[in-house]
Amino acid sequence: MKKMIFGAFLALTITSAFAQDSDLVLNDERWLAEFTTYVCEDGNVEARQVPNELALFNVQFGRLTTDFSLDNVLIKATFTENGQECRYSAMMFADNAAWTIGLVDSKAYSVNGTTDCAEGKNALDSILEFNSYKYLHGRAAIFVNSENAEASCGSDKIGIHFQARGRIN
């Protein structure tokens, strides 16, 4: 009996450990887009600089997926904290009528488990909290406030640009 209880406890502990080191999941993913570059307000001009808040943690955006409605959005990225690689995923809700997008939930974890990734997560959460976005012809950009947006784009925002790649089977 003790072996069964210990085995169940061990299995639960291992499952919990793996659950902590995994990205958020968007059920019924339908559409895939990949990060391409940073852009200015019109979406056609590349920003001259990466937002300072993201450069500080060497943030590398990867992919953006949505469900069929295009309202529920999952963004994945990596960043560096204390010299260690961290993975980040953010569940967001897009209000298509208002052209806004807001953070619903996020998660960050260390790839090798040596840092808690809290500073980078907080920076990403802060910059993604609530923003305007544009979606046109298979391209989407989330326009975030940044310290260096004026120097880079002549405005207070820099867009994180994603290019649609197609449907997820």
Image (spheres, rainbow, N blue to C red):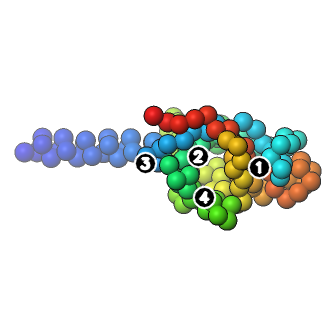
Q: Look at mark 4 in the image and give the residue it sits on.
A: 94
Identify the residue position indicated by label 1 in the image.
159
Q: Amino acid at mark 2?
A: Ile
Farthest left residue? Answer: 1
Quarter of the figure that contains the N terminus: top left
Q: Secondary structure at mark 2?
A: strand
Residue 27 image label = 3
Instruction: Give the mark nearer the N terminus: 4 vs 2.
Output: 2
Q: Quadrant of the C terminus?
A: top left
Query: Does residue 116 show up?
Result: no
**Residue closer to the observer: 43 or 59:** 43
Sort mark 3 into few (<14), some (14-19) or many (20+) by Cα contacts within 10 Å.
Answer: few
Separation of disc 4 and disc 3 at Cα? 16 Å
Give the image location of residue 47, x and y in percent: 85, 43
Looking at marks 4 and 3 on the same chain, the residue that comes earlier in the sequence is marked by: 3
Q: Are marks 4 and 3 in contact (CB under 8 Å)?
A: no
Image coordinates of residue 70 in percent, x first then y, are 56, 52
Residue drawn at (89%, 50%), measured in percent from left and top? 153
Q: Earlier in the sequence, mark 3 or mark 1?
A: 3
